[in-house]
Structures are given as structure tokens and as C-alpha cells.
Amino acid sequence: MDSEDEMLDAWAGTSDGEFVNEEEEDEDSDALPSDGENYESDYGFDYSNADDLHPSSRLPQTNFTVLSEKDIRQRQAEDVATITNFLSISPVDAGVLLRHFKWSVSKVNDEWFADEERVRASVGLLEKPVFNKRLTLKEMVCKICFEICPLENMRASRCGHYFCETCWTGYIHTAINDGPGCLTLRCADPSCGSAIGEDMVLGLVSVEDQQKYTRYLLRSYVEDNRKVKWCPAPGCEYAVEFQPGVGSYDLVCKCDFSFCWNCREEAHRPVDCDTVNKWILKNCAESENMNWILANSKPCPKCKRPIEKNQGCMHITCTPPCKFEFCWLCLGAWTDHGERTGGFYACNRYETAKQEGVYDEAERRREMAKNSLERYTHYYERWATNESSRAKALADLHQMHPGQIEKLSDKQCQPVSQLKFVTDAWLQIVECRRVLKWTYAYGYYLPENEHTKRQFFEYSQGEAEAGLERLHQCAEKDLQTFLEGDSPSSSFNDFRTKLAGLTSVTKTYFENLVHALESNLSDVDIPKVAAKSSSSSKASGSSKVRGGRAKLGSSRSGGSSRSGEEGTHWT
């Protein structure tokens, strides 16, 4: 087929950055290994590791780290130990300082050595405990409940303000129930700002309150830290630490959910966060319901209630108690209609007014709403369809491993390590479905007056979708033939070459598509696109019509066909 060759030609060349965020490979990395070579070493895939089945498992792990609760507690302990040793203070005081400065070790050091006294005053750390002369007494009066309590039942922070254990417990219990503010709790004396340490809190409250406090303490490391965020997937308890300036904002959690670090929505390259927010808001907005009502209904001329007409003639009767009879087209009373106006299925008055351009404002608004609704529906349906296709491909990917792979290995007498190309294809399908889905949101917000960009975008999107469908069909239907076979097939090596080739071609095409859309098609060559459009419209029926030409870094788009010696046709 020529279409695969067109994909090779349209988006040939290597991109500045990989679409699936793989590390840069050598130029020879696309070459297909021979049957005797080890696929596992070429692709870096370990079938014993289930994490490799994640759709974004090929994302580089250099710009983010996924943290479990155990990892977070370990990091908290390491930070406390660092501050304790560096500033020669107690672990409790180090914890108070870190929580105040949002777990930034460098910020603690900078502020502490710049002005230790000011830091102690703002945080509530006293350099030395205050000695209370009343400690020589056997009993003391609690200044909260005014009960006389034995000295062993009285507690105080470093400030020396003693209160009974019951009042302290109630005070701390209330603070914990109020939320994470309990982590910066101060003395119960209103005139005192001394910090209450973690040891005192956990030593006085119940087990339930201890669990709540330690949970707030754990979450503070993520919620107060600008470099760490919780995974937004429902029920996920992992956090992700991100290093800005390296790679894209798309991250993948161990729970298999990929999301954007910037807006915390699902991963949406090549569309920017603002477009995603507008698209999601539009999908949830009530305005689309009003647009549907406006486009598909008309108000009764008498009672003004909206009426939907889905079949039948133009004679409309409003529901009781109105019961007004009118013409659906011109909204005039039905008593003025009959054979002379066109009968039950036409209205001469409406057609005459339409030809004369006599439209009222409501009719114009209705027409605009209908056009807007049809346009939105066009993009939304395709956006949703690709999302469902991605979910189905993801389910097929997990079903493929390990049962189907082992079955294929047995029937074709191939080692499992040399069947990795099948999983590679499915990983690419899942990722490409995600990208293709978001291209429809991009297309919806692409200005209508930018005809050159829109023409080039629609051509590129159509070619990408066609190439992805070829890959999907090969990975799904062609593979099934070998899974259902009873003996090794002589054509299996040809299938391997075809599927690996389609995977490589589709990957390259989508990489360049992503980079083009991320730059908002800024490098589209307008004169050449216009000229190419004119020549393409005249050459009807040719399978080698090219779209617009764009400059995409070192890539070529919409170039001429390669010769048989230069490219391989995947059929």
C-alpha cells in the first residue's frame, strides 16, 4: 500500500525529543534485529517485571520519582536527622522547623544561620526551658479547669505553662479534629507562642488521634512541598516528586495512571493545560444543554414552552393547558395554513421569508446554536471514541501478558524474549490513542480563520489515524491467526517484521505530530501549503496526493514519495 510509504515520507526524520519520552537512541536502533539476536537487550523489556506493562513504562524516570508512604516517612526521617546533626538541636525541634519551612532543608539552613533568634521567635522554639518555681510543690492548680491536681498529672512545654493532662488532651484532641493545623500547635496559654512538639502530642492523645496526627504529618511532606504532589488517581496513595526543567510534564504513577504535573489532569500531550481545562469545562458545562435546547426545539408562540419535533408533519399542537396549534416552520397560527400554504409538510410563507432573508433574531440564534452544537458533537464523539479505544487496548495489553505471550511462544516455538515486539506494538497503540484523543480537543479550539493550519492539521491527523488503525489491526487480527494455529507458521517472521516496522513508523509519525502541535504549527510554510492544496484539489483519485508542507525541525512533512529502495512498504 502507498499510504504507509506516505507516512514514512510525510514525517520522516528523527525528532528533537521522543514522543514516548524514551532516551535518545542511536540511528541504528530502528533496525530490526535478526531472529538470533536478543530482543530483550535491544528493547530493555523484562517480562518478569509487571511495571513494563504500563502504557507509559517507556517514559524516562530521570525527571520524576514515585514515592510510597514508606518512602515519604523515610525521607522525613532523613531530613530530620540532617537538620538535627547540622544545627545541633533535638529531633523534635528539627521537625518543628521543617514543618514551618515546608520541609525545605536548604531554607531551614539559610534562615537559621541568617538570624537564629528571629527563626526561634517565629517558630516558637525556646533555646532553654523555663524553670517553674512551683515544681517544688506536690500539687498545682490547672489554669484551664482550675482543679487542684497532683504534680505528676501536670504537663508543660518548654515555656513552663503547666496544665493538667486532661485539659492538655482535650486541647490537642480539638486541634487534631480541626485539621492539619495541629502540626503547628502552640501552647494552650493565649499569651504564649511556644511550639508543642510531636513527642508531647503523641504522648497525651488516644490511639485514634495518634493515627490522625501521624497521617497529617505524612501528608504535610507532600502538600507543603512544591516539588511533590499526590497522584490524582482515585484511591491512589502514591506521591510523585518532579524535577522541573527535565523532559515534559507528563508523569506516570505506579498505579498505572499518567497525569500532567502542571494541572494534575490526565496526561494530555500535545495539548496545553489551558486548552484541556477549557475542554473539560465545556464537556461538563450546562451551556451545552442550553445549546441543544436552542438548536433542537422551538418555543410555543403562545406559552413560550420549548417544544421538540422529531418526526411528523409541520402541524404542531402544544400540550395542555395551552393546546395552541401552529406551524413548526414559521410559528404562525395553524388556522392561517392549509393547501394554499403548502399543506402539512411545507410552508410557503417560511420559504418566501427565507429567500427574502427575513429571519428574526431567534431564528438566527437557533441556526448558530445548531451549527455550534454539530461542530462540538463532531469533535467530542471522536474524542470519546479514542478514549474508549485506548481503554480497550489497555485491557488487551494486560490480557496479552503473560498468558497470550506464553501461548504464542509455545505454538510458534519462539522464546518469550523474542516476542517482546508484540507488547511494544500494544504499548505504542495505547499511547497513540491517548495522543489522538487530545488532537480533537486541539482541533476544536484551532481558529476557523487559520485555514492553512487547519488544512495541514486535518491532513496530519487523518494520516496519523490511518496509520494507527493499520498498526492496531495488525496487532489484533493478524496476531490472532498465529495464536489460533496448531503448529509453527513459516510466515511468523514476516509478521514480526511487519508489526515491528509498523510500530516504528507509527511511533515516528506521532512523535513529529506531537512536536508540531506543541509548537502550534508555527513552522507551517504558508505559501507552499496553499500551493500544495491547490494542486491536490485538482488531482482527484490519486493515492499519492500530499497535504501541506511544514518545517518541523529536522523533520520533513508532506514530501514526495520515496522510491522502493529508500523505504519499506508495510502492507
Image (cartoon, grey):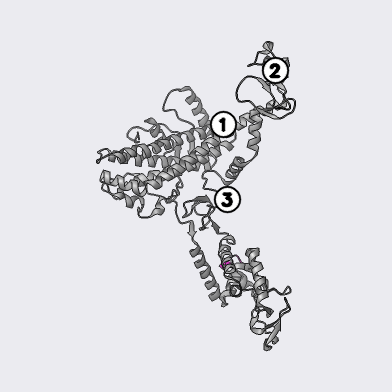
Give the amino acid type for the residue marked by disc 3 in the picture.
Answer: Cys
Considering the numbered disc 2 on the image, is that residue within a helix, a strand or a loop?
helix
Q: Which residue is mark 1?
A: 451
| Residue density around tag 2, few if under 14, some if 14–19, many if 20 or more, within 10 Å | few
Report if residue 221 lies within the magenta region. no
Q: Quadrant of residue 206?
A: bottom right
Q: Are marks 3 and 1 in contact (CB under 8 Å)?
A: no
Cα separation between marks 3 and 2: 51 Å
Q: Which residue is mark 3?
A: 263
Is the residue 193 above or below the residue 24 in the image? below
| Residue density around tag 1, few if under 14, some if 14–19, many if 20 or more, within 10 Å | few
Cα separation between marks 3 and 1: 30 Å
Considering the numbered disc 1 on the image, is that residue within a helix, a strand or a loop?
helix
Cα separation between marks 2 and 1: 33 Å
Viewer-nearest residue: 178 or 37:
178
Q: Is residue 472 left or right of residue 200?
A: left
**What residue range appears in magenta?**
101-106
The numbered disc on residue 258 is none
The numbered disc on residue 353 is 2
Viewer-nearest residue: 24 or 127:
127
Q: Position of residue 452 (x, y in %)?
A: 55, 32
Viewer-nearest residue: 204 or 131:
204
